[in-house]
Amino acid sequence: MKDNIILIGFMGTGKTTISHELSKLTGYKEIDTDQYVEEKEGLSIPDLFSKHGEEYFRDLETKALTDLQNINHIIISCGGGIVLRDKNVELLKCKGQIVLLTALPETILERVKENQDRPILRNNMNLPFIEELMNKRKDKYLSVADIIIETDNKDITAIAKEILSKV
Ligand code: S3P
């Protein structure tokens, strides 16, 4: 197993939940980039987006990954858009094994629909929008991933164990 496990994937693919499970199974500390950024800035993600805009938030994601470069034995659960910046991809690649979590758009919608904390989906909580955004990001996710894990209709512990058998 490599020193660090990095979870990437679209919103609602279960990164945070699976990160908790991986942390339990490995004893590794988990770091959620969204939570890291929120704590550093003292603002929630919706507030960061509305006060400063998406680019500012993306800068903070890059800053978070830079801060984490010297910390090891961790599970990093990344915000869904982290791969949009080449600099972030570079930082992730040298940090550890990158696990892409995937799910069908219908599954994603089901998982995210009650949550208003994602500015990108807030006014777009529908299947066509999710499908379109997933399609736009798909190649990027695939090009960055070392391992791909489907999460539809699977139990969290089974997913975590599947990841650990492959990293
Ligand atoms: C985003 C995903 C979110 C969060 C922000 C933007 C995105 O993280 O970083 O709302 O652009 O896909 P989750 O994937 O944990 O929901």
Image (spheres, rainbow, N blue to C red):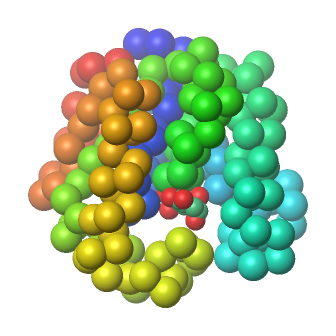
Closer-to-camera residue (95/87)? 87
Residue 105 falls left or right of residue 34: left
**What residue sits 65% from the left and 48% below the top?**
33
User: Would you say 134 lies left or right of 72 here?
Assistant: left
Q: Residue at x 36, y 22 (%)?
A: 146
Residue sitting farthest toward the left? 153
Residue 31 in the image, given as x and y percentages of width and height: 63, 43
Residue 64 place in picture, x, y as percent: 75, 41
Count numbered badges in the picture: 0
Locate residue 8, reporting x and y percent: 45, 41
* 90 in relation to 162, above or below: above
Q: Is residue 14 visible?
A: no
Give me the residue at 40% from left, 48% from top.
137
Residue at left offset 76%, top offset 68%: 53
Image quarter of the C terminus: top left
Q: Is residue 105 visible?
A: yes
Q: Is residue 15 above or below residue 145?
A: below
**Image quarter in which the N terminus is found:** top left
Where is residue 23 shown, x and y percent of the image? 48, 38
**45 sits left or right of 39 in the view:** left
The answer to which image quadrant residue 152 occupies is: bottom left
Ligand 1 quadrant?
Answer: bottom right
| Direction right: furthest residue | 41
